[in-house]
Amino acid sequence: MLWFYFLTYVMSSQTLMMALPLRIADLPKKPPPGPSAAERQKRTTDISKDDDSTTRSCDKKTKVQEMQRYFGLLPSGELTEETLAVMKKPRCGLSDVEQVGETVRWKKKSISYRLETIKLISVAQKVFRRAWKLWSNVTPLKFRNRIMTVADIDIFFYNHNDSSPFDGRGGVLAHAFRPGLHIGGDVHFDSDEDWSFNSTGINLFAVAIHEFGHALGLSHSTDPGAIMYPAYNFDPNYEPQLSFDDVENIQKLYGVNPNFTLLTSKRPPPKTPTKCDPYLSFDAVTKLQQEVLFFKDRFMWRKHPEFDETRVSLISSLWPDTVPANLDAVYENTWENVVVFFKGNQYWMLRQLKLEEGFPRSISTLGFPSRIKSVDAALHFRDQGYTVFFTGDECWRYGQPLINEISWYRFMVSVNFYEYDYTHILQYRPRYQYRYRCIPT
């Protein structure tokens, strides 16, 4: 995709700093043998080389719009705060501009790989075996680890200084090459990163699954729920796995594992919800400035009155990974200029896309009695400056600012969502989920 070049162009001086529990140190800095990364992955678009300022400005806006559509943002073409937040997300360095005319895949079913000697190699080997197993579970492929002999796929931790270099901590974390001779299939991880071997921080397992998909011939996916989506998902509450889209694409290349049904029966590949699924119910719906946001599992849709597009994206593509999936309620507090998320007995408060200090907190700090374990829904009334919470058959009116005491009274609720000028009904059902017939388009 062209916007990856734009990201590199705009963010060449920006890094994303993260402190993690483990670091792979003292890694070799020399580039791997064979053709350079530049020869195999030459960047064919560079807007900084355009001499015409008007054309360059148009190209820049087009690339920003393309990237915004990709991540479900408003395609304004402007570098808004939300757009910059997405651009700072850790991502893969593989270019989607270089597309080959024919399918590229390995011509054999048994593929060997080799990891260079590094500190903590035994831990890294376990992580890589788990990552390869996800791909072998759904295809007839077998992956063999080689110690001393030549392998099909070499795995390196590098900070090489060619025309496709890494960018220090954060930003581009790794890249891989399509199947082929010499450097083909090789996977490079940025040695400057503080790699983590658990579920927090820059998760080596999640990045390895993605890059191994490239080494097998897969391109990036436009499905935000796919492991092959170009922006990595480091949600500490989500165990990385292949999505329905990932499985479908890899099986087009290599076929189906004869034991596929058995191996995936306990945890079938998840499918990203579609906006007009007649059985789709939402975890939460809220208004954010001029937009309406719909939340489901770890996904969200954004509807703006000035744009026709309504695209699905990951919640984590906009907000920090600390915001959980499967939310109970969300609302924008316009008086405090914050967005508040609820799940279970905790709530998260974010201002300008950043988590406020001291959060998450228990909902008891809002004044709820101890018997209230969760919030089912929340509605914020902008003009009046108060919020109404729903818990079971009780309704709680909440004043401003947030430290005010809560008063409550009981009634069963069924609300027509007139504020958004839609004919769809917002219903408060026994499980207190929002249900629309379809996301407005």
Image (tube, rainbow, N blue to C red):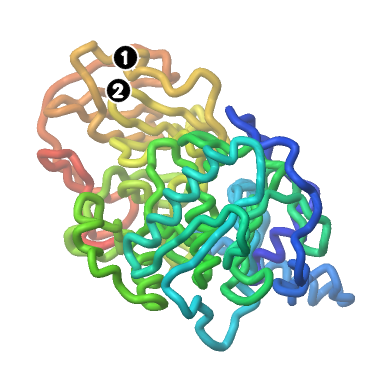
Marks 2 and 1, how far apart at CA:
8 Å
Horizontal side of residue 435 vs 385, given as left or right: left
Q: Nearer the viewer, mark 2 or mark 1?
A: 2
Q: Residue 52, position in %: x, y? A: 87, 77
Q: Residue at x 34, y 53 (%)?
A: 420
Identify the mark at residue 404; answer none if there is no mark: none
Horizontal side of residue 133 vs 355, given as left or right: left
Q: Does dot 1 land on a helix, a strand or a loop?
A: helix
Q: Residue at x 41, y 48 (%)?
A: 240
As drawn, 182 above or below 197: below
Q: Residue at x 52, y 63 (%)?
A: 112
Q: Does dot 2 land on a helix, a strand or a loop?
A: loop
N-terminal of the two: label 2 or label 1? 2
Tell me where residue 270 sits by quadrant. bottom left
What residue did someone put label 2 on? Answer: 345
Mark 2, other Cα within 10 Å: few <14 / some 14–19 / many ≥20? some
- Please state, as top left, top right, bottom left or bottom right, where the N terminus lies in the image: bottom right
Identify the mark at residue 364; answer none if there is no mark: 1
Between 79 and 133, the residue placed more toward the observer is 133
